[in-house]
Image (tube, rainbow, N blue to C red):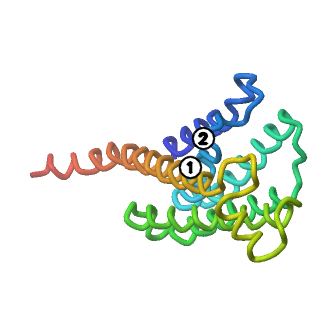
Amino acid sequence: MIAGLVLFFAAVVYRLLPVLLHVKQQQPEWLPNFSPMAALCLCGAAFLPRRLAIALPLVTLFGTDIILNSYFGFPLFTVEFLGKTIAFAAVAGLGWMLRKNARPSVILPAVLGGSFFFYLTTNTASWLYEPGYAKTATGWLQALTTGLPGYAPTWTFYRNTLVSDLLFTAIFLACIRWSRKPARAAVMQPAEAIR
């Protein structure tokens, strides 16, 4: 529990670094969509106590979005925000379904599915919202691959999302494993003393 909460705090600090450092750029141009939020939604729902499992990741998302959007002068409620919120809620729902079987061999493949779902949902929302995309199958394909002229291709956002999701999930799993080791050792010691 403590390791999970420390990770949540670290993720909030990481996400709010532009505000904390007074930088007028959300992320370096080479790291768009490199964020711990999907990993927090998945792992939080899978490992945190029931009363915090869904609420804490989504409150963290909303709270940091309000701060970031206010700082950068963006509106909070847009179609893209709705798409992102739906995607993160679905990732948290996936983590909730995995609670009874939350092992790395189950969680890590779920990260792949969650990352792809996030990419598909948010880029579809962008295609619906952004007037630069034709509202056709070709326009939707453009939103999923090359994006709009003058911006990085949208597949780079997916790559960064996937890498950050895997990295932050692996860190979360390592912290959970590390925090559980002393408890196991304490339980095993008395049994060994009996021998």
Please tell me which residue is depicted at 58% across the width and 53% down the height of the picture.
161
Q: Which amino acid does label 1 sit on?
A: Asn
Please tell me which residue is depicted at 47% across the width and 70% down the height of the picture.
100
> Badge 2 local density, few (<14 within 10 Å), some, or many (20+)?
some
- Image coordinates of residue 182 in percent, x first then y, are 33, 42
Which numbered disc flags the more N-terminal residue, 1 or 2? 2
> Badge 1 local density, few (<14 within 10 Å), some, or many (20+)?
some
- Identify which residue, 180 or 169, lies in the foreground: 169
Name the mark on residue 86.
none
Name the mark on residue 160.
1
- Image coordinates of residue 5 in percent, x first then y, are 57, 42
- Furthest-front residue in this view: 149
Residue 22 in sight: yes
* Residue 58 figure quarter: bottom right
- Identify which residue, 135 or 180, lies in the foreground: 135
- Furthest-left residue in this view: 195
- Image coordinates of residue 107 in percent, x first then y, are 46, 63
| Secondary element at tag 1 | helix
Q: Which amino acid does label 2 sit on?
A: Leu
Kindly identify which residue carries mark 2: 31
- Identify which residue, 75 or 195, lies in the foreground: 75
| Secondary element at tag 2 | loop
- Mark 1 touching mark 2, by CB under 8 A? yes
Q: How far apart are marks 1 and 2 (CA)?
A: 7 Å
- Image coordinates of residue 64 in percent, x first then y, are 75, 42
Is residue 153 toward the left or the right of residue 66 in the image?
left
- Identify which residue, 5 or 25, lies in the foreground: 25
Please tell me which residue is depicted at 71% across the width and 65% down the height of the picture.
142
- Furthest-top residue in this view: 21
Please tell me which residue is depicted at 53% across the width and 55% down the height of the picture.
162
Residue 48 in sight: no
